[in-house]
Image: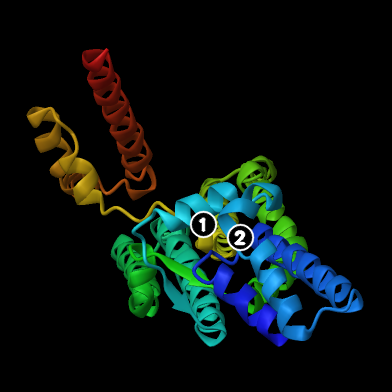
């Protein structure tokens, strides 16, 4: 019987350890055991029974269709992709690092969003505007440091973005349990985050009843606090959720990270390609120039969402033009 199990392991060696493959493997083992028991009862010797079982069930190509893994077998057999196998320890370490990275990244974004509250409150409390501007830049600096640190934390795992990897059944079960435990927390964080962004105008409505310069400014500052904390919850919860999805689907992953530079290089129109390569540096320059010239930091942040919308429109128009030329 041990010979049959070893032979079965060799048959499935190299296949991705997906739920479908593991189920097929279990079903085939059961069929082989049933056949082996039947042959032994009919008077066959152990060696004869093993040989006949392997002869009847030893060709996975013939059985793949019935087991429901024909497509997986074909893709694996004729694919040149060699996957790097991650141990259980590596999977758990990656997940813990990803949680830390998600926390740092979400906090960094939050600090960048709430940075404008310092000039607003400096004006509200009639103190020197320079103090508010300095605190604003400190907040942006802290945010940038946190986001850079978030990337640094994941530096040793960069290979997972470009190199095919696989995990074993033990890691899959561990991740499924962790994912199931996380889902209630995800629902709460995601919902509260969205709610804070939707209700960010509530302080303005409440403080408007008090009237006065201070309360008007405080309402504006509270809007950014609501949005900042809401975005923090959304980014953190979504990052963890995507991490679970990515790890649980890593055995079937066929598409990998493509640097932004590569995406730009794929744009065939030379004019648009040149524009897109210098687009965000120009936007950053415009943002800083306008902000320093006007000192209206509470308004100039709108340059970023507008720039993102324009960027999306340019790419969409270029894609539509390229498709129309092909047609």
Question: Percent from the top left, x then y, of residue 279?
Answer: 18, 41
User: Could you say which quadrant of the image residue 321 lies in?
Assistant: top left
Residue found 18% across the figure and 38% down from its top: 276
Residue marked by disc 2: 241
Question: Percent from the top left, x then y, of residue 189?
Answer: 68, 59
Q: Is residue 156 above or below residue 234?
A: below
Q: Nearer the viewer, residue 25 or 16?
A: 25
Question: Percent from the top left, x then y, of residue 138?
Answer: 33, 71
Q: Is residue 324 above or below residue 254?
A: above
Residue found 39% across the figure and 79% down from its top: 153
Where the C terminus falls, by quadrant?
top left
User: In the image as oriented, which residue stretches furthest toward the front?
Assistant: 43
Q: Nearer the viewer, residue 164 or 44?
A: 44
Residue found 42% across the figure and 53% down from its top: 254
Q: Is residue 307 above or below residue 155?
A: above
Counting residues from the start of the chain, the first of labels 1 and 2 encountered is 2
Residue marked by disc 1: 252
Binning the other alpha carbons within 10 Å of mark 2 as few (below 14), some (14 to 19) or many (20 upward) gives some
Lateral position of residue 19 relative to residue 118, left or right: right
Kindly tell me whether residue 164 is visible in this rendering: yes
Binning the other alpha carbons within 10 Å of mark 1 as few (below 14), some (14 to 19) or many (20 upward) gives some
Question: Percent from the top left, x then y, of residue 18?
Answer: 62, 62
Kindly tell me whether residue 279 is visible in this rendering: no
* Secondary structure category for the residue under label 2: helix
Q: Is residue 146 above or below residue 77?
A: below
Give the alpha-carbon distance from disc 1 to disc 2, as whole Å. Answer: 18 Å
């Amino acid at each position: 019987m041990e010979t049959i199990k070893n032979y079965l392991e060799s048959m499935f060696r190299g296949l991705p350890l997906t739920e479908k493959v593991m189920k097929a493997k279990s079903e085939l083992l059961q069929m082989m055991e049933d056949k082996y028991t039947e042959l032994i009862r009919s008077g066959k010797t152990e060696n004869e029974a093993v040989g006949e079982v392997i002869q009847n069930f030893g060709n996975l190509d013939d059985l793949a269709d019935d087991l429901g893994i024909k497509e997986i077998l074909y893709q694996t057999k004729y694919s040149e992709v060699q996957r790097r196998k991650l141990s259980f320890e590596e999977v758990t370490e990656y997940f813990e690092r990803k949680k830390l990275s998600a926390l740092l990244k979400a906090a960094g974004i939050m600090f960048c969003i709430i940075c404008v509250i310092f000039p607003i409150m400096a004006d509200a409390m009639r103190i020197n505007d320079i103090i508010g501007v300095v605190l604003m830049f400190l907040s942006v600096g802290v945010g940038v440091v946190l986001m850079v640190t978030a990337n640094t934390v994941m530096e040793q795992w960069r290979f997972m973005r470009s190199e095919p990897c696989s995990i074993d059944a033990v890691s899959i079960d561990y991740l499924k349990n962790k994912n199931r435990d996380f889902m209630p927390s995800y629902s709460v964080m995601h919902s509260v985050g969205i709610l804070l962004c939707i209700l960010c105008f509530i302080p303005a409505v409440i403080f408007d009843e008090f009237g006065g310069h201070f309360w008007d400014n405080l309402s504006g500052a509270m809007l950014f606090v609501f949005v900042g904390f809401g975005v923090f919850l959304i980014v953190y919860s979504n990052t963890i959720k995507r991490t679970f999805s990515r790890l649980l689907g890593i055995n079937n992953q066929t598409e990998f990270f493509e640097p932004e530079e590569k995406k730009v290089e794929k744009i065939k129109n030379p004019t648009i390609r040149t524009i897109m390569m210098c687009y965000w540096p120009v936007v950053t320059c415009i943002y800083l120039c306008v902000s320093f010239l006007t000192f209206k930091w509470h308004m100039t942040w709108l340059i970023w969402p507008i720039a993102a919308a324009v960027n999306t429109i340019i790419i969409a128009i270029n894609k539509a033009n390229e498709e129309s030329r092909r047609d």
